[in-house]
């Protein structure tokens, strides 16, 4: 059964229609369950988001070395770095080593519990395919809101040189914001509430609401400006606080939280990144 799952998802030329296979509905549901369990794996989520991480980090390093006029700064990245360095008590190099050690431990523990995973580059494309409709939903909602507020957006063709940086920023947002707000905050809150013997549905709802509020706030640090300054975050005149902007980010955070609980980190991160890519394309069209 596991081999069939890999075949249908990774090799399109070898796909056989499910109707022609001697499987009952229950067995097909088992296939879908295995697929969901795979996407919820820590190792799978980290593996399929490697392109997002590398795209951002490599572009960021190149922009620093080349003296780019546009500074690449993500609030979620700054927050994560502060926590990783224990607010400056340990150097970033050591913090990076500790983070890698924690991730290695989590992957090792999962492999001992669940066994090896057959991962290959096709899984990245399959995750992108899963994320595409979620990203499209977010973009359509944002586009409609934009139309209602200010009419049809006008393209900006004067800054094509910034395209690589803008796309890389969206990759970084997909990785770091989902890692902070969904994996750490939503997942951590859900885990604590479950340990307190709260019902799963209530735990999920509370965790989604809490993480979504943080997700909206880290874009502005409007309600807690002192906390933002502590993380090294300064006001961005290109991203002023508005009630509508905060509300949209809260709702989109809730939507991505639902995606994370249903599909895992990989799909949530790629949904976020693809939505950002759509926005960049819209800006230049």
Image (spheres, rainbow, N blue to C red):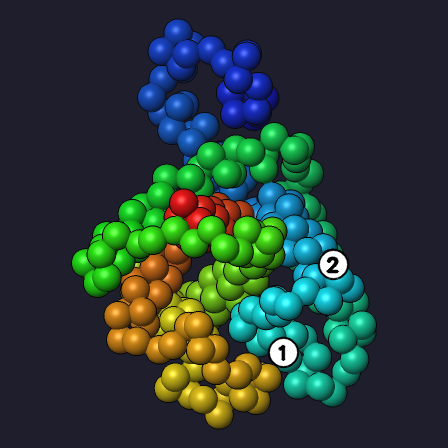
Number of numbered discs on residues: 2
Tell me if mark 2 has few (under 14), some (14-19) or many (20+) residues whose alpha carbon lies within 10 angstroms of its own: few
Give whichever of discs 1 and 2 has the lower sequence position: 2
Q: Which quarter of the figure is the C terminus placed in?
A: top left
Q: In the image as oriented, which residue stretches furthest toward the left?
A: 148
Answer with left or right where residue 201 lies relative to residue 33.
left
- Where does residue 281 sit, x and y in percent of width and height? 44, 46
Which label was assigned to residue 62? 2
Answer with left or right where residue 243 lies relative to residue 274.
left
Q: Quick check: 236 above or below 180?
A: below
Q: CA distance from mark 1 to mark 2?
A: 25 Å
Q: Nearer the viewer, mark 1 or mark 2?
A: 2
Instruction: Give SS at disc 2.
Output: helix
Tell me if mark 1 has few (under 14), some (14-19) or many (20+) residues whose alpha carbon lies within 10 angstroms of its own: few
Front residue of 111/248: it is 248
Answer with left or right where residue 218 lies relative to residue 44.
left
- Where does residue 38 sit, x and y in percent of width and height? 54, 39
Q: Residue at x 64, y 46 (%)?
A: 51
Q: Residue at x 51, y 63 (%)?
A: 177
Front residue of 222/22: it is 222
Answer with left or right where residue 8 lies relative to residue 121.
left
Would you name the residue on which mark 1 appears?
83
Q: Quick check: 133 above or below 64?
A: above
């Amino acid at each position: 059964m596991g081999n069939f799952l890999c075949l249908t998802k990774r090799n399109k030329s070898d796909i056989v229609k499910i109707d022609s296979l001697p499987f009952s509905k229950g067995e097909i549901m088992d296939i879908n369950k295995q697929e969901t369990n795979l996407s919820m794996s820590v190792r799978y989520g980290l593996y399929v988001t490697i392109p997002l991480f590398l795209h951002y980090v490599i572009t960021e390093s190149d922009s620093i070395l080349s003296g780019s006029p546009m500074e690449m700064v993500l609030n979620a990245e700054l927050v994560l770095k502060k926590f990783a360095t224990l607010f400056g008590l340990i150097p970033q190099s050591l913090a990076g080593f500790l983070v890698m050690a924690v991730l290695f431990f989590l992957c090792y523990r999962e492999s001992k519990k669940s066994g090896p995973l057959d991962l290959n580059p096709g899984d990245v494309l399959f995750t992108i395919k899963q994320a595409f409709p979620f990203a499209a939903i977010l973009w359509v909602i944002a586009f409609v809101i934009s139309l209602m507020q200010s009419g049809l957006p006008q393209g900006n063709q004067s800054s094509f040189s910034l395209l690589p940086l803008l796309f890389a920023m969206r990759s970084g947002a997909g990785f770091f914001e989902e890692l902070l707000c969904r994996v750490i905050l939503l997942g951590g809150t859900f885990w604590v509430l479950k340990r307190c013997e709260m019902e799963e549905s209530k735990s999920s709802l509370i965790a989604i609401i809490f993480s979504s509020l943080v997700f909206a706030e880290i874009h502005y640090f409007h309600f807690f400006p002192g906390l933002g300054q502590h993380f090294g975050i300064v006001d961005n005149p290109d991203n002023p606080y508005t009630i509508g902007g905060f509300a949209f980010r809260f709702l989109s955070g809730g939507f991505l939280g639902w995606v994370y609980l249903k599909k895992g980190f990989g799909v949530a991160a790629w949904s976020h990144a693809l939505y950002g890519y759509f926005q960049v394309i819209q800006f230049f069209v």
